[in-house]
Amino acid sequence: MEQALLLNATYEPLKVVNWQKAITLWCQGKVEVIAVHDREVRAVSVSFKLPSVIRLLRFVRIKRRYDYVPFSRANIYARDKHTCQYCSQTMSTGELTFDHVVPVAQGGRKDWENIVTCCVGCNRKKGGRTPAEARMRLRRAPRRPRSVPAARITIGLRNAPESWRDYLYWNVELDDG
Ligand SMILES: [Zn+2]
């Protein structure tokens, strides 16, 4: 279903909302529609185009509480500054992967405290073992971040309509995976 990119009054992208939410915000007079999707939607007596980019009319100060940081690959990499948590090398996204500190097979969870950024080499070396078993040391214990370095919204590249491109800038990390 068509989604809309919600911008703050400053045009800073805030998040992606579904079309129902976009229409609701518009009906409440809280947003202006900046761009629409091509496809028309027909209701009983009217047809209209769903909004693809909407902008809040009043600036909203975003409290970046830790629980607002989405648990995503991009945000794990951001928390760890694109640095392998075992060999301390900083690398590009393509050379990095995840590591479950405590392997899933040993009951390791998929959460902020058990997933770290890891280079492909270290990941292979560690295999399905704990750091102690593999005699590898973590740079530091992984934690849930209070905030992401630059507020990031992760949007699947394939899901980002053309009309969003103008508004996706430095603080948006496009996730191609
Ligand atoms: Zn490494």
Image: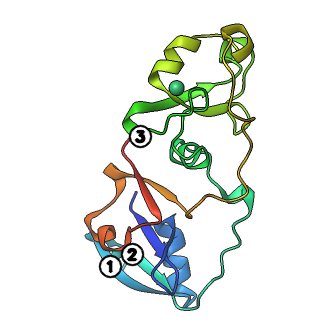
Judging depth in this view, the residue of 37 and 64 nearest the camera is 64
Is residue 82 visible in the rendered image? The answer is: yes
Of marks 3 and 1, which one's residue comes earlier in the chain?
A: 1
Q: In what element is the residue under mark 2?
A: strand
Hey, what amino acid is under mark 1?
Ala
Which residue is located at x 71 percent, y 72 percent? 63
**Mark 2 vs mark 3: in front:** 3
Q: Residue tagged by mark 2?
A: 53
Is residue 43 visible in the rendered image? The answer is: no
Circle 3 crowding by C-alpha within 10 Å: few under 14, some 14–19, many from 20: some
Q: Residue tagged by mark 3?
A: 93
Circle 2 crowding by C-alpha within 10 Å: few under 14, some 14–19, many from 20: many
Judging depth in this view, the residue of 153 and 36 nearest the camera is 153
Q: Residue tagged by mark 1?
A: 35
Judging depth in this view, the residue of 75 and 3 nearest the camera is 75
Q: How far from the left and from the top, in percent, is residue 158?
A: 31, 49
Q: How far from the left and from the top, in percent, is residue 75?
A: 56, 48
Q: CA distance from mark 2 to mark 1?
A: 5 Å
Hey, what amino acid is under mark 2?
Val
